[in-house]
Amino acid sequence: MTERPIRIFGDPVLKTKTDEILVIDDKIRALVEDLLDSVTLPGRAGVAATQIGVGLRAFSYNVHGEIGYILNPHIVETRGEVELVEEGCLSVPNLWFKTPRFPFARVEGIDLAGNAVELEGEGLMAQALQHECDHLDGLVYLDRLDQQTRKEAMRQVRESEWF
């Protein structure tokens, strides 16, 4: 299909909890194609459906050369001590902040055939799984920051050229 433009912080769709995908049809297949086309650009670890303006529970990922998608993902397990990791977001361009994330995460969902899918990983994959599921729950990574860091982040957002 096509690479879709990324919605930027301030767009209400980014703060909206997504709906489960109940029927897999041509519309959903096209959404997956668009998510995959949108995540393959350099520097992209994941793209959630909300980031391309669609309020459905789906995301694509591109971590260490592994590219894929998942429908109706839900985090079913996190492990380890929460760590502060450098994080950015396509919807919050050019801003990076230390964000609390678990070092391991596992999500479950389905593929286009309706088959069960499980994704898990450590490091960047764990971070991407948590980050994208947050998007599908109406959160951006700025929502995870401690109060002082969030205050600074919001100042930088307000001063950014794109806001």
Image (cartoon, rainbow, N blue to C red):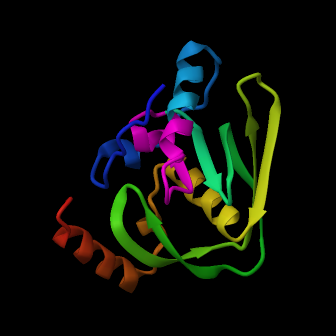
The residue shown at (30%, 81%) is: 152
Position of the C terminus by quadrant: bottom left
- Quarter of the image holding residue 50? top left
Which residue is the extreme one toward the bottom? 148
Residue 157 or residue 162, whichever sits in front: 162
Q: With 76 as the anchor, is 158 left or right in this view?
A: left
The image shows residue 133, relative to residue 57, as above or below, that is below
Q: Nearer the viewer, residue 100 or 111?
A: 111
Q: Relative to 106, say whether 11 is above or below.
A: above
- Report if residue 118 is visible in the image: yes
How many badges with numbers are in the image?
0
Q: Quadrant of residue 12?
A: top left
Q: Position of residue 46 (x, y in %)?
A: 55, 52
Quadrant in the picture for residue 82: bottom right
Left or right: residue 107 versus residue 12 is right
What residue lies at 52% left-to-right and 46% top-to-bottom?
39
Residue at 59% over, 21% down:
29
Q: Is residue 54 magenta?
A: yes
Q: Is residue 126 magenta?
A: no
Residue 98: percent from left, percent from top: 49, 80
Outermost top residue: 26
Image: magenta residue range: 35-55
Residue 79 image position (x, y, % from top left): 79, 71
Q: Is residue 18 visible?
A: no
Image x and y of residue 54, in percent: 44, 33
Q: Residue, x 35% and y 71% (percent of image)?
A: 95
Residue 156 lies left or right of residue 49; in this view the side is: left
